[in-house]
Image (cartoon, rainbow, N blue to C red):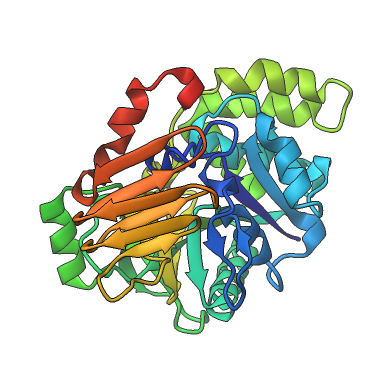
Amino acid sequence: MRYAMIMAGGSGTRLWPMSRAGEPKQLIRFIERPGTSERVSLLELAANRLEGVVPLERRYICTGEGHREVIRDRLPDFTDERILGEPLPRDTVNAVGFSAAVFSKMDPGAVFAVLTADHLIRPQATFAHAMDVGFSIAENDPTQLVSFGIRPSYPATGFGYIENGGALPGTDGLGFKVARFVEKPPLDKAREYVGSGRFSWNAGMFVFHARTFMDLLKRHKPESFAGLKKIQDAWDTEQQQDVIDRVYPTLPKISVDYAVMEPAASDPKVSLAGVRMDVEWLDVGSWPSYGETLEADKHGNRVSGGSVALHDARNNMIVSSSDSHTVALLGCDDLIVVHTPGATLVMPRHRAQDLKKLHEELPDDLK
């Protein structure tokens, strides 16, 4: 059967000060739902995106254990047993492995999608069709590891890339063989990849047969496999939580791309497949990318929430979570200003990538 797991464990340091330890970026209600004035979180949008793709009762969220209560409050359809709580974040290979361990114990034939909670993806129908093609590939051949490629619009160095190795028959023209994965290349390589026309951005979404993924872990990341096998054996027993709390924090921290997808390219027991996902795809991982979700005024200023006063100001972005506090800009250009009750950020737009460095220097009570 088909399952889905939404990864919702990121810290979102480049969206500070709205993204904080208690309410990271995937839980902030700062995205306007299309066609309404309602503001929702990226996680809520990701969960709704699965309508018509995977039945509600087989959708799961993998997140920090400390976020369980707020997720249950905001997404009440996700009951306790469908929230996979991580005692500590151990990167994406263990989040995916945690899900594979649980799904393969419940259902030896489980095929599951790995989805992200920090992207805006439109239109829904195109996303759903691509996911259906991906599921079909893995269902017809459990040795296929399916990834999803986005047509690159510029030579990004913050995304991984997938090289097209030729069409896969019977996939509505969307499927292709994957020649290789490249994780976050330098700018000269990114330009080469985009110019060749053979590469897609790696969307960070996958479809795996659960047992196949566990076998891959056993071969390529045995330390993770050993710990996750203990969690699998204890799942749905009285020892479940004790084993998770004891074992999960000891798992080696590494991404699924480095730990599994790259070595899988030379693993004779599996094959790599890609599916083109021809959608509008926005990684809302920084304030400039969030700004792309806002409409600019005639001077290029973008405003979200709160009370804002502008004079002789151009190409700024102002975000506020307080209606009772006015943010005023006079004679300012190309600034990002983010106001919250606990902290206010002011920075030049071109320094947005350095926000992570500032975050590292903050006291813990401000993170």
Any part of residue 201 in sight: yes
Q: Residue furthest bottom?
A: 172
Instruction: Estimate the x, y position of residue 171 in percent, counting from the top left.
Output: 51, 79
In the depicted structure, whether residue 172 falls above or below residue 220: below
Instruction: Estimate the x, y position of residue 278 in percent, counting from the top left.
Output: 43, 77
What is the number of callouts on the image?
0
Q: Residue furthest right?
A: 238
Instruction: Place residue 312 in its image quadrant.
Output: bottom left
Instruction: Determine whether, in the image, residue 332 is placed left or right of residue 83.
Output: left
Instruction: Estimate the x, y position of residue 244 in percent, counting from the top left.
Output: 71, 23
In the depicted structure, whether residue 28 falls above or below residue 206: above
Instruction: Estimate the x, y position of residue 340 in percent, counting from the top left.
Output: 48, 41
Q: Residue furthest left?
A: 188
> Which of 257 and 362 lies nearest the eye of the viewer?
362
At 26% from the left and 62% from the top, the residue drawn is 311
Instruction: Determine whether, in the image, residue 245 is placed left or right of residue 221.
Output: right
At 47% from the left and 25% from the top, the residue drawn is 366
At 52% from the left and 78% from the top, the residue drawn is 123
The N terminus is located in which quarter? bottom right
Any part of residue 202 in sight: no
Instruction: Place residue 16 in its image quadrant.
Output: top left
In the depicted structure, whether residue 13 falls above or below residue 144: above
